[in-house]
Amino acid sequence: MKILNICIVTGARPNFMKVAPLVRAITKAKTEGNAVDYKLVYTGCEGDTTLESSLFDDLQINKPDVYLGVDCVNLNELTGRVMSEFDKYLDTNPTDVVIVVDDLASTMAVAIVTKKRGLTLAHLVAGTRSFDITMPKEINRLVIDGLSDLLFTAGMGENSNVSREKTELSQVYMVGNILMDTLRYSRPRLAQPKVWDELELQVKGYLVFTLNRKALLADKENLKKMLSALCVSSGDMKIVAPLRKEAQTVVASLVRGYDNFVIIDPLSILEFGYLTANAKGIITDSGNVAEEATFNGVPCVTLNSYTEHVETVSCGTNVLVGENADKLADAVKDIIAENWKQSSLPDRWDGRTAERIIQIIMSLELPA
């Protein structure tokens, strides 16, 4: 019996939250007697500091089987090097289907090599669009979706995007939001972080702030206005900000004098999940964090004028304020006053997305 060999490729830490359910679904299918197996590939280095030691324990999956070892800042150089290394990987590893995640340069590189090899390419979280062609990630999305044999979308909005681009409907599967698989799986294991007692936090008694976008960090003058508006409008309520080193340095220099703004080191997935699930509200520039907020029913303010995750706005808890300090202040005041919109969970946020994906892949008629 021929074994269906699936290669799951990740390019950054957030990808692991989306592929962990796939790993568990394949493992389950294999134990049930199905002729299927997988390898987990990370395009970065084994010593990548963004992959904290607790990451894989929290997700309850093994570390990647293979590290391609590509680590560079220039996106064009990264694309070329990942293409070369992944091509070498395929030389020695039998592969039928390659699953890529999201919209990174490394994701696009793997997609190109996969199609040059004539292998089946599946794109997880397909169909997301910002409609801003000046964004490198938007180009990545268009290329990856254009090459993919299987486009796994999270909802009707993403389906509409790929339909407008004349994608064959037989290639598109609305499987739901796979991040919800991880959130549902992790919910019983959420861990109260040590800072909870240190900061004397209480349920619904604080705000959470996260920031990663380089463009926001670079415009220090406007960021200072936004942070000042956040601190003033939140009154006496504490703002807890788990930030990585670069963001810590920038933000710390801009919030001097505001005692209610507390910067802490990044948390593990389970600790961060506990912190956000119990917050009064969240201010972020992350689409994943906004999705998590909608799942938990926590008011969320996104520091952007658009989102690829439109369902978090259309029926979720998310509100977009762009990079406008006044709009941010008004939104935070509404959170404090509990004057927030009603929300609901989008369709197929049921925690069974990975199961649907693996069933679809195992039903394919692949070349012998």
Image (spheres, grey):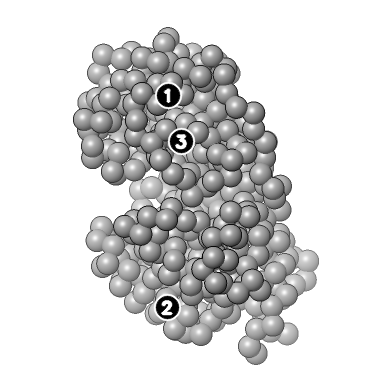
Q: Residue at x 34, y 30 (%)?
A: 324
Quadrant of the rendering where the C terminus is positioned: bottom right
Q: Which residue is mark 1?
A: 240
- The image position of residue 3, as x and y in percent, is 67, 80
User: Outermost residue toward the right?
Assistant: 32
User: Outermost residue toward the bottom?
Assistant: 368
Mark 2, secondary structure of its residue: helix
Q: Is residue 136 left or right of residue 250?
A: right
Mark 3, secondary structure of its residue: strand
Chain-order first, disc 3 or disc 2 = 2
Q: Is residue 265 above or below residue 311?
A: above
Q: Which residue is mark 3?
A: 320
**Res 177 seen here:** yes
Q: Which residue is mark 2?
A: 113
The amino acid beneath tag 3 is Leu
* Quadrant assignment, res 85: bottom left
Marks 1 and 2, how far apart at CA: 42 Å
